[in-house]
Image (cartoon, coloured by chain):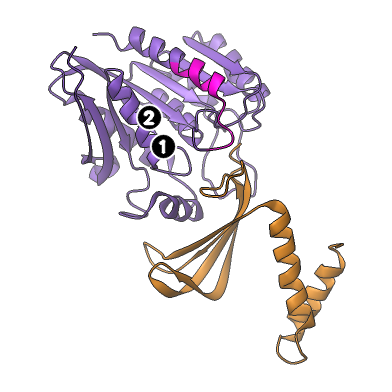
């Protein structure tokens, strides 16, 4: 099926695409048909730059890989040395991680 | 039998007078031929949909595929264009109708056109094929597993689409619908609801739902491909067009 479900969020990030590095301003996250991964559905992330024809970096992950990646991101934020990550972010990461059993 | 055909990228006049990209394939035979507007799926103006356009030309129809993402992402690769269009909420209905009208006009203007035009669409294009057939004067329409004809998208979806049942009475031509029994968008219940509504309205339509098939069973490059359903579906489409688009 086409799920059409899409989460769109503003981000402050840099990404590297075919034309080199660019400033990403938006991300979309959705579970739908992949273009390249050989599965019927995948967890897809697009990082999009600014402008009318934005640069893009796309990711297509199978569901287990997406969960593992999400857990690794949260774990990295939660366990970074004191002072490197804003404390409110680290606390939220620890709280979210506690709710995601390994 | 002379079977030469030409397939090429062209520019057509779409909604609002905009010049948009399209892929046109047509038999070079001088005999009059019907036309088919192919409406691509949400993943975009891709190689596989262009193959469908060439198949119609090989079967004796002039077929055209408007790039519905021409404005958002001119020149971009299909997957980039689809991602950008998704982030912007998809294609507005009014613009879709204008682009299909422009594509149909381009087909009618061909020197060997017989004046008859159908639409066929896949996935989101299935809904858009139905929308076009309720908004334009057409000779036939095919809806391949289009969702949100009778129901609204999930609240989380950025797609700005609405159900179309309220305009079903304006359906201008016979409709062929091809669906998968294991699809959820549209679900078999949704298909049955549309079937009942069209019957109540006295609109000519023919629906087939394939067991063992889900969404996108025509998509040869995806695991969802179901050869038996796709082969039977192609036969039904060609039979339908042979009747509805005959000179």
Disc 1 to disc 2: CB gap under 8 Å: yes
Q: Position of residue B199 (x, y in %)?
A: 55, 9
- State left or right for residue B191 relative to residue B166: right
Q: Is residue B94 visible?
A: no
| Main SS category, magenta section | helix
Residue B243 position in % (x across, y down)? 35, 7
Neighbour tally class for label 1: few under 14, some 14-19, many 20 plus, Cα within 10 Å: some
Q: Magenta includes B224?
A: yes
Position of residue B234 relative to residue B69, above or below, is above
The span picked out in magenta is B222-234
The chain coloured orange carries which letter?
A: A
Q: Quarter of the image holding residue B101?
A: top left
The Cα atoms of the two marked residues, 1 and 2, are separated by: 7 Å
Q: Is residue A71 left or right of residue B97?
A: right
- The residue tagged 2 is B52
User: Badge 1 is on which residue?
Assistant: B48
Q: Which SS class for mark 2?
A: helix
What residue lies at 57% left-to-right and 26% top-to-bottom? B226
Q: Residue at x 81, y 68 (%)?
A: A96
- Observer-nearest of B141 and A33: A33
Q: Label 1's element?
A: helix
In this rendering, position of residue B107 left or right of residue B99: left
Residue A89, relative to residue A2: is it above or below? below
Q: Colour of chain B?
A: purple
Q: Residue A42: x percent and y percent?
A: 63, 49
Numbered disc 1: what chain?
Answer: B
**Chain containing the residue with disc 2:** B
Residue A74 marker: none
Residue that appears at 57% across and 44% down: A33
- Residue A47 shown in magenta: no
């Amino acid at each position: 099926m086409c799920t059409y479900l899409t989460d769109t969020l503003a981000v402050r990030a840099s990404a590297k695409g075919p034309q080199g590095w660019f400033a990403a301003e938006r991300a979309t996250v959705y579970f739908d048909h992949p273009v390249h991964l050989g599965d019927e559905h995948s967890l897809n992330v697009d990082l999009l730059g600014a402008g009318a024809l934005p640069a893009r970096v796309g990711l297509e992950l199978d569901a287990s890989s997406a969960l593992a990646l999400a857990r690794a991101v949260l774990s990295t934020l939660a366990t970074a040395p004191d002072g490197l990550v804003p404390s409110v972010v680290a606390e939220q990461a620890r709280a979210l991680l506690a709710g995601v059993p390994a | 039998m002379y079977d030469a055909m030409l397939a090429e990228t062209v520019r057509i006049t779409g909604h609002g007078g905009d010049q948009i990209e399209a892929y046109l394939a047509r038999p070079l035979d001088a005999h009059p031929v019907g036309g088919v507007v192919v409406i691509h799926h949400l993943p975009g103006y891709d190689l596989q949909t262009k193959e469908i356009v060439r198949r119609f030309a090989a079967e004796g129809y002039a077929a055209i595929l408007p790039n519905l993402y021409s404005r958002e992402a001119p020149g971009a690769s299909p997957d980039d264009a689809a991602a950008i269009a998704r982030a912007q909420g998809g294609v507005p209905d009014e613009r879709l109708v204008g682009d299909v009208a422009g594509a149909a006009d381009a087909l009618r203007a061909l020197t060997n056109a017989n004046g008859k035009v159908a639409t066929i669409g896949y996935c989101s294009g299935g809904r858009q094929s139905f929308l076009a057939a309720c908004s334009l004067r057409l000779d036939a329409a095919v809806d391949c597993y289009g969702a949100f004809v009778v129901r609204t998208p999930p609240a989380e979806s950025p797609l700005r689409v609405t159900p179309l049942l309220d305009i079903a009475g304006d359906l201008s031509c016979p409709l062929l619908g091809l669906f998968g029994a294991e699809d959820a968008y549209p679900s078999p219940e949704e298909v049955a609801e549309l079937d009942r509504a069209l019957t109540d309205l006295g609109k000519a339509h023919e629906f087939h739902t394939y067991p063992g098939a889900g969404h996108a069973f025509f998509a040869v490059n995806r695991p969802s491909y179901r050869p038996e359903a796709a082969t039977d579906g192609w036969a039904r489409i060609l039979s339908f067009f042979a009747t509805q688009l005959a000179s």
